[in-house]
Image (cartoon, rainbow, N blue to C red):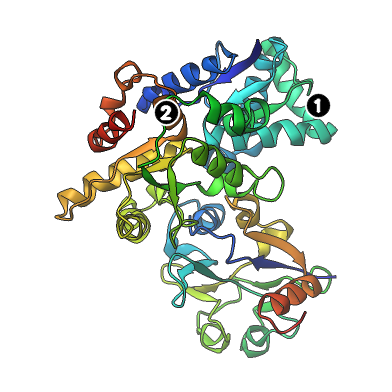
Amino acid sequence: MIEYTFFRGCMIPALQPFVEAAAIKVLEKFGIRLRELKDETCCPVPEAPKALDELSWYVMAARNLALAEKTGLNLMTICSGCFETLEETNEVLKENKVLRSAVNEKLAPLSLEFKGLMQVKNVIEVLYDEVGVKRISDAITRKLDGIKVCLQVGCRLYKTEETKGLPQKFREIVKATGCKVIDYETDRMCCGFPTIYVDPNFGYMQRTKLKLDDMTSYSPDGIVVICPACLNQFEMAQLDLKAKGYSYDLPCINLLELLALSLGISSSSLGIQWHRIKPDQLLKKVEDGR
Amino acid sequence: MQKVLLHNPEKCSGCTLCMLICSFSHFNVCDYALSSIKIVNDPGRKGRFIAIYCSHCEFPICEASCPKNAIKKDKETGIVKINSMLCIGCKTCNVLCPIGVPWFHEKRRVSIKCDLCGGLPYCVRFCSTGALTLVPREEARAKVLIAGGLKA
């Protein structure tokens, strides 16, 4: 039995508990147990807090890492933002001894120390490298052959394109479920989430709407994402655009939910019905494909 | 050896974090209008973006055009900077720059442009996809020529 410390982040437990449930259930099926991390804080977000005070940003991230190091297990995260923060901090502090001692000085009153003994992994890495695409496709009980999806990789994963290849791995895992992956023109475009700092309406109209228009022209059954910010943006934008008189009804689910469904885990046990944009049509298609 | 910004449109997702962090680091507020780097839709390709930013030219026309000598290219770093205390807000640099990099700050009544944050620009550090990098000018030039099909 492989074990990981589970870093859930803020957004997923608060807004998307179905993703958290799916992560635990899916990995359990493949013999990976997730241990909850106690007393963790926000990762913190790789934008605003870092811009305000970089050392505090490193200290907060290192505190989470130091707590995780105590368990003796590697850390796994299901959020792209948490992954960027924790992985970057882990790598930077392992190399940069000056910064590391400055961070450890701040951690000392908490009886914590960053030692750099641990690896930070994204759930995609765990699924692709440790479970493997073949084991995933063998374990699938409901082939999702008839389902067409558009992928939203998200900005942060593209950063790892040349080093870890997470976008490609994400795509292969989706393909392993039997889904047909649609290639669309605006696939690299940002979902529009970062615009919440300035003008959410600009994000809805100039980013999310353009993506939704492009996607719907291929009439997909849904969008598959990995980043919780993208999921939130696609759902909030559709609600906002509906209020403005446009009509969109494109369900958006996380990769882990898709895997859970294809592994035969019931949608009600995950709480998929709590999505803001109800994926009823998609679920019906999944049931029919049994 | 001068380092300059290099934007890779193949990687850019248009998340605009560079614009947000630019205005935040210089004016303590997130506002697209106060950013010295602009991300705009590529008119030729759907879902792609191009960036407009200062090249810190070898022979800056903004420096040559400034009637008050408020713009100087640093001899060591090569960074072209506007001294706000000397700038009279005449907008000559705004008009003469071939890509219109210097912009006019309405409240402060002076022209503003990229100062590369003194060496390690915030836009590069916060770019979410790794599309923005800081590279030596020769390398940037070679990469642009190759991308444009002008050099193998």
A282 versus B1 height, above or below? above
Q: Nearer the viewer, residue A75 or B66?
A: A75
Q: Chain of mark 2?
A: A
Q: Residue at x 26, y 47 (%)?
A: A238
Q: Name the residue beneath numbered marker 1.
A: A101
Q: Name the residue beneath numbered marker 2.
A: A262
Q: Secondary structure at mark 2?
A: helix
Q: Residue at x 38, y 39 (%)?
A: A231
Callout 2: few (<14), some (14-19), or many (20+) C-alpha neighbours within 10 Å? many
Relative to A269, B31 lies left or right: right
Quadrant of image for the N terminus of chain A: top right
Relative to A277, A160 lies left or right: right
Labels 2 and 1 within one chain? yes
Amino acid found under the numbered disc labelled 1: Ser
Q: Position of residue B108 (x, y in %)?
A: 46, 68
Can residue B56 be seen by looking at this rendering?
no
Q: Position of residue A102 (x, y in %)?
A: 77, 28
Q: CA distance from mark 2 to mark 1?
A: 47 Å
A235 versus A68 height, above or below? below
Relative to A25, A18 lies left or right: left
Amino acid found under the numbered disc labelled 2: Ser
Quadrant of image for the C terminus of chain A: top left
Q: Nearer the viewer, residue B17 or A14?
A: A14
A79 versus A264 height, above or below? below
Q: Residue at x 30, y 54 (%)?
A: A219
Q: Residue at x 33, y 57 (%)?
A: A218
Relative to A213, B12 lies left or right: right
